Image (cartoon, rainbow, N blue to C red):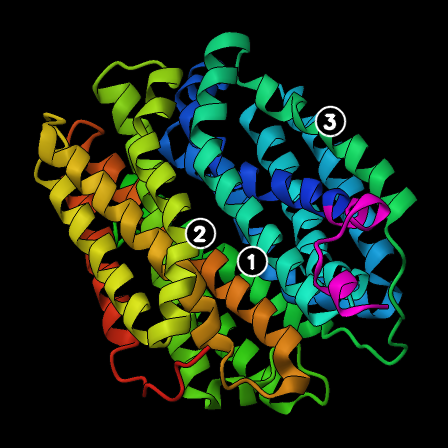
Amino acid sequence: MSQAALASPPTGLRLLPLLAVCLGFFLVVLDTTVLNVALPDIGRQLGGSTATLQWVVNAYTVVLAGLILSGGAFGDRFGNRRTYLAGLGVFTAASVLCSVAGGPGVLMAARALQGLGAALMLPASIALITSSYPDPAARSRALGVWAAVAGVAFAGGPLVGGLLTSGLGWRSIFLLNIPAGMLALWATWQHVQETPRVGRASFDVPGQLLIMLALSSLTYGLIEMSALGMGHPRVVAALVAAAVLLAAFMWRERTTAHPMLPPSLFRVPSFTRGSLAGFAFNFGEYGLLFVLALAFQEAHGWTALQAGLAFLPMTVVSAGMTLPGGLLAARFGSHWPLRLGLVLMGLGILTMSVSAQALSPPFWLGMVTFGLGSGMAVSPMTALALSEVPVHLAGVGAAALNAARQVGSVVGVATLGSVLAAGGTAHPGLALVIAAAVCLVGALSVWQVSPSAAQP
């Protein structure tokens, strides 16, 4: 094959594997942001407190965060195409259950099933793109499209959620996934080839159970704190149990022959600091979406569509800054744009916190500032975290970084939602200050990274 052919973008059938995989991936990312503006309508129709709505969001992310590492092992053992199809099938079927849920419990269970499907799909999607485009130049462009799809899904989620909820009701958010999921299933079946299986890939079942129980206990304790109080026996028991289970998980990973999360990863300083930054990033981003979606509608009386439109200054700017953030990382190293991005996120949230009740012009300036920071930080964060990870741990390192980010989403929604519930949706200031503080601490966590470690 000529050099020109290798350098050209995939065309014809070469484009179809990318489209097939990206369609399913788009749905997974969309479902992390599309639901927030529909939460007040869900609460009114199905009943439930702020804590219930937190579980509707977190049932998805708890399962996704807890199972994503095992999802990668499933792809190695059974083939990534087969794993991706299974995950997409579960995700689509769970969307049907979400659309017909008659109570909050059924909706939470269906959201957890969506999280299971997403945990199988995410690692497999990267592996399928990598195997479908063996040429390094074509692969880089394909992965760039894959990353851009995430930005578009994140930016469009609140608006799509607002349009569907205002026009057709909140159930239409999940109905949208059904034809799109079926199309992605057909396209993947027809146009994506299977990857070789790794017969010896193993599953750390005890470790998997321990981390799922730890995340669930932590989430329960944080969510119930606002209703029961920090000193309530159930809250204390849940938080203590989370700490004990997390310690048991860490012990298990150090002693088992086949850990799902190799302890040696955390002896790589850039990975540890990049993962801490990822936790802070998602804590601020997804916690903010949850808080503002409720504040816009319950405190200011806006419709779901108005709330979705209100997020555009943040989400569009964030999506637009993703590519420049990657270029800055390539020019100056990952550490500076990541630090600056997290600082801008924190400053943007602080600006919003002092003007959230009146929604005055500084509030919208804060949203734009936050969007600039989040878009600038996302690519350098990945580059930094994986810059010194050994090649044989690259796959599990990427999955672990994604898990750290999803845990940040879980803890952010649980913590900020509880603070919001205690103070009322008309007074989101304290919740926003906490989100800002976490983002700024995330910036500090990468302040000590050496420039050589931060080169992409």
The residue shown at (58%, 70%) is: 398
**What residue is shown with label 1?**
65
**What residue is shown with label 2?**
410
- The answer to whether any part of residue 59 appears in the image is yes
Q: Amino acid at mark 2?
A: Val
Range shown magenta: 1-18
Answer few, some or many: residues within 10 Å of disc 3's Cα (few below 14, many 20 plus, some between 14 and 19). Answer: some
**Residue 140 horizontal side relative to residue 230, left or right:** right
Disc 3, SS: helix
Answer few, some or many: residues within 10 Å of disc 2's Cα (few below 14, many 20 plus, some between 14 and 19). Answer: many
Q: Is residue 12 magenta?
A: yes
The residue shown at (81%, 70%) is: 76
**Residue 358 horizontal side relative to residue 57, left or right:** left
Answer few, some or many: residues within 10 Å of disc 1's Cα (few below 14, many 20 plus, some between 14 and 19). Answer: many
What separation in Å lies between label 3 and label 1 (alpha carbons)?
Answer: 23 Å
Q: Earlier in the sequence, mark 3 or mark 1?
A: 1
**What residue is shown with label 3?**
178
Q: Are marks 1 and 2 in contact (CB under 8 Å)?
A: yes
